Image (cartoon, rainbow, N blue to C red):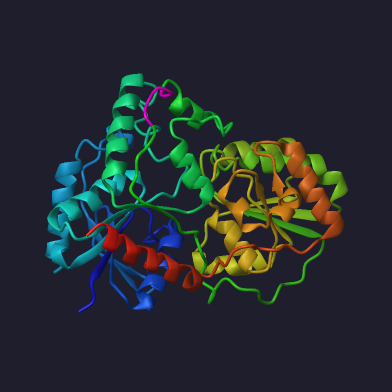
Amino acid sequence: MRPVYLYLTPFFPGPGTWRGAFSLDFVRALAAEGRYDVRIFVPGRGPDYDVGGVRVCRFREWRLPSMMFPLLFARHNGRAFLRALRARGIDPAAVAVCHANTPCYGPYALALKAANPRALALLHHHFLDSYGLALGRALRRCYLHKLLHYFLFRRMHARLDGHVFPSEAARRAFLAVPDASWTDFPDYRRQMRGLGWCPPPRIRAAYVLRNGVDPARFAPGARPPHAGLAIGCVANLTPQKDPLTLLRALDLARGDLGDWRLRLIGTGPLLRACQTFVREHGLGDRVAFEPERGHDALPGFYRALDLFVLPSRFEAFGCVCAEAAACGTPFVACEGTGAAELLPPEDRARWLARPHDPADLADKIRRFARERPPQRIALPLPLPALLPPFLTWLATLRKTHP
């Protein structure tokens, strides 16, 4: 009987959403390895469901609005999680790994470990913010609220057996806390303001597991013919993703690109501002806003582009860059993000723009339009190639933390 591998995440494709598609690809690849009986749990109401041949189990949790005091109900939710396991015939003693995604779900891994000390409690960091200090809309400016949660999360991080990061950039950002001098992203610097005297994190082990792609879907293929320069972007339209910088860059470069078009897939709080910018700058015949689509439809989108651009200024990895590259489409991203690690050092000046700098991004796009150079990717991206070293690390961790 294979040991159980619990994968716990708030982001997983389901009815009405494709958010967390990387998680679906990951658990599929992990199940195909055959070493574990992989089980997926997501918080929320409603019945269990199937997606892409994977069974997803739901469980109820208590949370305050806007995740205020995110660890307040940690003990109650941990007990509820264990009941949800048993209700589906999973004995905590049979669990080898509890892999929790995002910091607020680390307590679930610790609850499982309390019930089965032999299990590994992992936390997978998907963002550059690993302390939840932006949570709680009403109290995020309150220094005491911030200070309390800094120490609560720091203690939780120290108790976990291992931490998984999607990039070296994410690992460095986490270990640098509370120092935020490495980024100019104002929201994060605001979170860390006043915490400079606090001790940095202590963790037992770390592993960088880059977000690979499913090579059965994301691969070079037939590229539909089109006129001019086809540029694309897939992103949540938020300040972190900075879509307005892309629009401003294209406005600056418009006279040098000939016949060009931008296809922008995404929605979010900046959608209206982006639409207003396009209208006011006469870009309506150049920019198309497209709704979110199923993950299986993205390979065709990437292959229809000449260039993919992700203007994120605060990004732990950037799965969409890896997906575009796997489909044979070059990408431009920002310096200091996880996507930068996909490029050899000698190519980064050509393909990486300064964050939140429309002029520099415009220069990168102009250069591509002139030269159309190929792009080299430095790291293996297919998930089947990335998983065996990760599983070896897990085996080593089990020996280190019995």
Main SS class of the magenta portion in the image: loop
Q: Is residue 235 above or below residue 372?
A: above
**Is residue 109 toward the left or the right of residue 270 in the image?**
left
Residue 2 percent coordinates (x, y): 23, 76
At x 39% / y 33%, what residue is drawn? Answer: 200
At x 55% / y 66%, what residue is drawn? Answer: 381
The C terminus appears in which quarter of the rendering? bottom left
Residue 75 percent coordinates (x, y): 16, 43
**Is residue 3 toward the left or the right of residue 290 in the image?**
left
Q: Is residue 31 above or below residue 123?
A: below
Q: Quadrant of residue 255?
A: top right
Q: Nearer the viewer, residue 30 or 216?
A: 30
Q: Indicate yes or no whether the magenta region holds residue 197.
A: yes
Q: Nearer the viewer, residue 156 or 56?
A: 156
Q: Nearer the viewer, residue 400 or 69?
A: 400
Residue 8 percent coordinates (x, y): 30, 57
Residue 387 percent coordinates (x, y): 44, 69
Q: Nearer the viewer, residue 157 or 226?
A: 157
Total numbered badges shown on the rendered structure: 0
**Is residue 125 toward the left or the right of residue 75 in the image?**
right
The N terminus appears in which quarter of the rendering? bottom left
Q: Quadrant of residue 156?
A: top left
Residue range in magenta is 195-199
Q: Is residue 17 above or below residue 382?
A: above
At x 62% / y 42%, what residue is drawn? Answer: 243
**Is residue 170 toward the left or the right of residue 131 in the image?**
right
Q: Quadrant of residue 201?
A: top left
Q: Residue furthest front?
A: 400
> Does residue 250 appear in this view?
no
> Does residue 138 appear in this view?
yes
